Image (cartoon, rainbow, N blue to C red):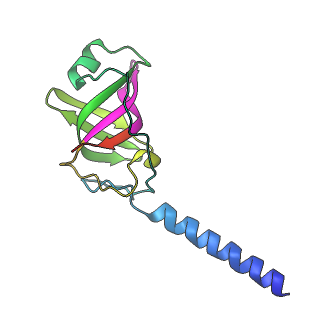
Amino acid sequence: MKKTVSAFAAAVVLALGATVAIAQSANYSGPSTAPKAVAAGAYSGPSVVPLMTVKQLIDTGRDDQHARLQGRIVSHNGGEHYSFEDATGRITVEIDHDKFPAGQTISAESRVELLGEFDKGLRKTEFEVERMALMP
């Protein structure tokens, strides 16, 4: 009986921990209409993927092209969709909650670097983020 109670207690603690993890912030504190998610760590070393501006990416980017963007996430558009902006323009970016830097809050004023893949289609153009880093 004691083992059953202990196993049940452990299951309850795990379930509550998972619920709390789901409800935690994705570390983005800018404008949003959706609940925030859990943050995770990311690679922060050098990359050979080209640094581009939003305008360059939209004008000359190829579907499935990898690129880096530097600028700000200016709004949360619901789900995993955000608006990203640099000095040359704005693009919709898709960011899974686990791509936000762990333990760091991202606001609409924070400068970030995004590494990802350009998704250029007939109906939508967006940038799918694979890694995000907060810039100094």
What residue sits 24% from the left and 42% below the top?
135
Q: Which quarter of the rendering shows the C terminus?
A: top left
**114 w.r.t. 106: above or below:** above
Q: Residue furthest toward the front?
A: 45
Residue 95 located left or right of residue 68: right
Residue 6 located left or right of residue 38: right
Prevailing secondary structure class for the magenta stretch in the rendered image: strand
To which quarter of the image does residue 80 belong? top left
Tell me residue 78's x, y (percent).
Answer: 36, 48
Residue 36 located left or right of residue 32: right
**30 w.r.t. 52: above or below:** below
To which quarter of the image does residue 50 belong? top left
Q: Which quarter of the rendering shows the N terminus?
A: bottom right
Residue 25 located left or right of residue 83: right
Mark count: 0
Tell me residue 99's x, y (percent).
Answer: 43, 44
| Front position in the image: 1 or 133 | 133
What residue sits 32% from the left and 27% below the top?
68
Residue 120 counted in the magenta span: yes
What residue sits 45% from the left and 57% below the top?
38
Q: Residue furthest toward the bottom?
A: 2
| Front position in the image: 103 or 20 | 103
Residue 36 counted in the magenta span: no
The stretch of residues the image draws in magenta is 112-131
To which quarter of the image does residue 19 belong? bottom right
What residue sits 17% from the left and 48% below the top?
109
Tell me residue 17's x, y (percent).
Answer: 56, 69
